[in-house]
Image (cartoon, rainbow, N blue to C red):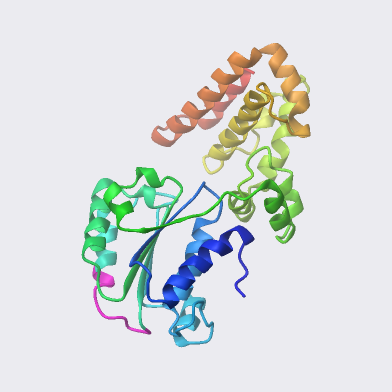
Amino acid sequence: MTHIADWLLPCLRQVQVLKQTNSLSHALLITGADGVGQEELAHEMVKDLMCESDQASACGYCHSCQLMRADTHPDFRVLDGEASTIKVDQVRLLVRQISQKPQVGHNKVVLITHAQAMNINAANAVLKALEEPAARTYFVLTSSQSTSLLPTIRSRCLLVNVPTPSLDAVKTWLTQQPEGEVLSSLFWLTTQPFRLLSIQQQGKTPIYLELPQKLSEMVHGRMPVSDVIKGMDSNNVEDYCNGLAAILHQFICHSTGAPLDAALQGIFNVLVSRLGIQQLMLRYQSLQNLKSDLQKTNLNPIMQLTHELNQW
């Protein structure tokens, strides 16, 4: 049995049945909210497609399965758009690489994760490949913003919609992960399980764990702004912006009746009496603008975030 999150299993089984009955489209688009597991699901589907057996799921023993486990399969190509834009030259190179017959096994598979990162030329190159697919070639795309993809790309793909798991399902899943209980304390930041896991894998959990306490000390006048962002640099400034914006978002939602995490209660009481909800909304928008500006310009992140927190 494949060990993946429970909410991903129905989607995986749907595609496995189509594979076993030779009814599978040559292109799949796996969609869902950011962090619910599209990429994890896609990798499991790719393993099944690369397997040389006729069974629905990967056997784990054939030569192709062994190469996939070693991450050395010559007929499997990946483009990842998480960190940067996917450009047309990357797509053209990939299409040339998979234009020949499979070197091992039966199929060739192209995986494009975070496909919304394709620029228009790259998207058109992918569209051409989907319109004229090479024999025994599958394209698997993932996206949390599928509506931003070309409609013609979406129309040529079998859509696999990953459901957003319930909070109870996320809590149960986290108990099975290393330090999962710690991640459960970050639900004020996000309840999307794989985003939490990514934060942990990047070693950034302490930034988010400490932020509410530091912010509480600051708004009560017991900590200077400089100590709140101590340790911030160009590699983690986006994390500080995301954390602060998430806290303000929680406050705005709470003002309309949503529950508030206990770790944020004291901060909310101080800021709402000091600034009011309207100003908190402006501060939230200011943080979003700052995060965008920091990505485009050479602004000093410490100076900019210090200025922002001084408004609190």
On screen, residue 163 above or below 105: above
All told, the count of numbered labels is 0
On screen, residue 230 above or below 273: below
Residue at 49% x, 66% y is: 14
Question: Magenta: predominant secondary structure element?
Answer: loop
Q: Residue furthest bottom?
A: 62
Residue at 45% x, 29% y is: 299
Between residues 286 and 224, which one lies in front from this camera angle?
286
Name the quadrant containing residue 77: bottom left
Q: Is residue 230 left or right of residue 307?
A: right
Q: Quadrant of the N terminus?
A: bottom right
Q: Quadrant of the C terminus?
A: top right
Residue 72 visible within the image: no
Residue at 57% x, 36% y is: 242
Where does residue 74 sit, x and y in percent of width and height? 37, 77
On screen, residue 289 above or below 147: above
On screen, residue 138 above or below 181: below
Q: Is residue 161 left or right of residue 89?
A: right
Q: Is residue 98 magenta?
A: yes
Q: Is residue 287 magenta?
A: no
Where does residue 213 sit, x and y in percent of width and height? 76, 33
Where does residue 245 sit, x and y in percent of width and height? 59, 30
Q: Is residue 157 left or right of residue 195?
A: left
Between residues 3 and 201, which one lies in front from this camera angle?
3
Task: Look at the image and give the residue range highlighted in magenta.
Answer: 96-105
Residue 261 visible within the image: yes
